[in-house]
Image (spheres, coloured by chain):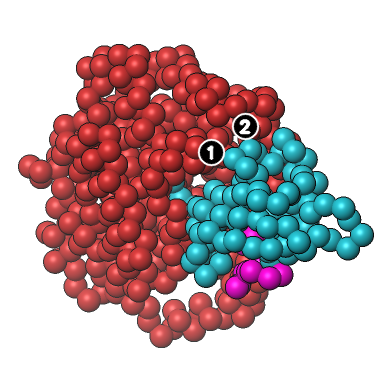
Chain colours: A cyan, B red
Amino acid sequence: MVKVKIEFSGGLELLFGNQKQHDVDVPVQEGKQELTAGHLIAWTRDNMLRERPELFVKGHTVRPGILVLINECDWELSGATESTISDGDVVVFISTLHGG
Amino acid sequence: MLNRPKTQEQVCRECFFTAFEEEVHQTIVDNKLFKHGERLAVAASGGKDSTVLAHIMSTLNARYNYGLDLFLLSIDEGITGYRDDSLETVKRNEQQYGIPLKVVSYKELYGWTMDEIVSQIGTKNNCTFCGVFRRQALDRGAVLMGANKIATGHNADDVAETVLLNILRGDVPRLGRCANIITGEDSSLPRVKPFKYAYEKEIVLYAYYKKLDYFSTECIYAPFAARGFAREFIKDLEAARPLAIIDVIRSAEDFVFAAASDEKLPQPRTCERCGYISSQPVCKACVLLEGLNRGMPRLGVSRTRGRRGEKAGLHPDVGRGGGGGSSGPAEVASESAEAASTMPAERQGGGVAQAPAGGEGGAAPTTAGCADDGLPRFEAWASGAAGAGGQTAAEKVARAAVRQRGPVEIVYETT
């Protein structure tokens, strides 16, 4: 089990009971050594999402327009869905899909 | 640390701030957006783009000595649960940046809030009303503040979406203007888009890392808007090839239109009712308002055929699309939306492709011909409206018949 601090921003919190910060324990995927961001997303969708999955996920990744930061770093630098999530990591999902 | 989509560089937070600010500064300098001593109204909605714009403008104005007098201008469309919350954010911005704020509302300008409009006309063409009204409201608000330029927070993604929407609708006049960084430069109130080349992702990350306070909920009527489809497509494009957004904008900048289409472009004149700049005898906002006040919600949205228009006692040009004018393709789009009402709901989209938050293109208003305070004199003609509104039973039957028949070929009327 990996302890992750998840934060939702940019309106995404509305899909998660209007709560921005969540402390969760995520199991590592079967047969894998470490938790990947892709698996975290799938787990979040299956266990935390209250409604409208299509507003959060598209295929195996987040909906285009949602930014992901792992420990304040852009996840594209660590391999996007292949990024490793370790114990105590902070993952932030920011939606850009609203008016400016 | 982040990966900049435009350059694919990996940069740390501080370098990102510097790079982002420098690029906006370069955009401003290269395109000569400002002159020393100008009074600039920053269009602010409390959302991510306008909050970052207010921050960046006040930062750069101080750092590079632009010599600008800055103001915040906010429009209250009267959308409960959306606009009233975001206005709180702008009021906080006023405190944080020390920039005076002016709020202008649809209610005071037009006598209608968006909520009232939607309850009158439904959710299919409400974005048309909002876009047209907001554009004029920004101009009027700027005039009231004594500003001589407006800056909007349109970012690269927005401009790319607008280009696509205009291509999809075949709106040639708008297509030629929508990628311009300055619109209406020859008028008394030009508009500039300092963020034209700034990616939405970078704006959001800038705000996040700098802990800037912004409001982030979708307009409650947005799910019905056509722009949503363009946005989804642009986001998918960006995921596949991040430079695509800038490339779409560059393509639009390089469009050259055949000379023949220039002849059909309407010349700017002023509205007979309120004096606002218009390509038709009566400006779009007045046409839409006339429709609302008379209970004819399709007026200015769909084509008004000759007989119906005359029956309503309107000027013969009101409600018709003139030559390649900006209302022509709009009306065809609504017509096809209407005729295609048997198609699945997702394809119907929203009304006309208006650019977001304030619109683009065309020149700004002159104040000649307006009432003393520059506000439209709609009371006069609105009160003159007799109960000519509504459809006859025969028209309703005919319309129902069209819907049942299914999608039909659109025949362009020549007027």
Percent from the top left, x then y, of residue A42? 74, 62
Per the rendering, the mark at residue B205 is 1
Dot 2 crowding, Cα within 10 Å, few <14, some 14–19, many 20+: some
Q: Tell me: residue B71, above or below residue B291.
A: above
Percent from the top left, x then y, of residue A32? 89, 56
| Badge 1 amino acid | Leu
Q: Tell me: residue A81, above or below residue B67.
A: below
Of labels 2 and 1, the one closer to you: 2
- Quarter of the image for residue B393 reads bottom left
Reply yes or no: does residue B66 show up in magenta. no
- Quarter of the image for residue B288 reads bottom left
Dot 1 crowding, Cα within 10 Å, few <14, some 14–19, many 20+: many
Reply yes or no: does residue A49 show up in magenta. yes
Q: CA distance from mark 2 to mark 1?
A: 10 Å
In this image, B413 relative to A38: left or right?
A: left
Q: What residue is at 17 percent from the left and 56 percent from the top?
A: B108
* Residue topped by disc 2: B1
| Badge 2 amino acid | Met
Q: Is residue B9 visible?
A: yes
Percent from the top left, x then y, of residue B77? 30, 57
Q: What residue is at 20 percent from the left and 54 percent from the top?
A: B109
Q: Which residues are magenta?
A: A46-57
In this image, A96 relative to B212: left or right?
A: right
Q: Tell me: residue A21, above or below residue B293.
A: above
Q: Secondary structure at mark 2?
A: loop
Q: What residue is at 46 percent from the left and 50 percent from the top?
A: A99
Q: Secondary structure at mark 1?
A: helix
- Residue situated in front as seen by the camera: B316 or B34: B34
Label 2 resides on the chain identified as: B
Q: What residue is at 88 percent from the left and 63 percent from the top?
A: A30
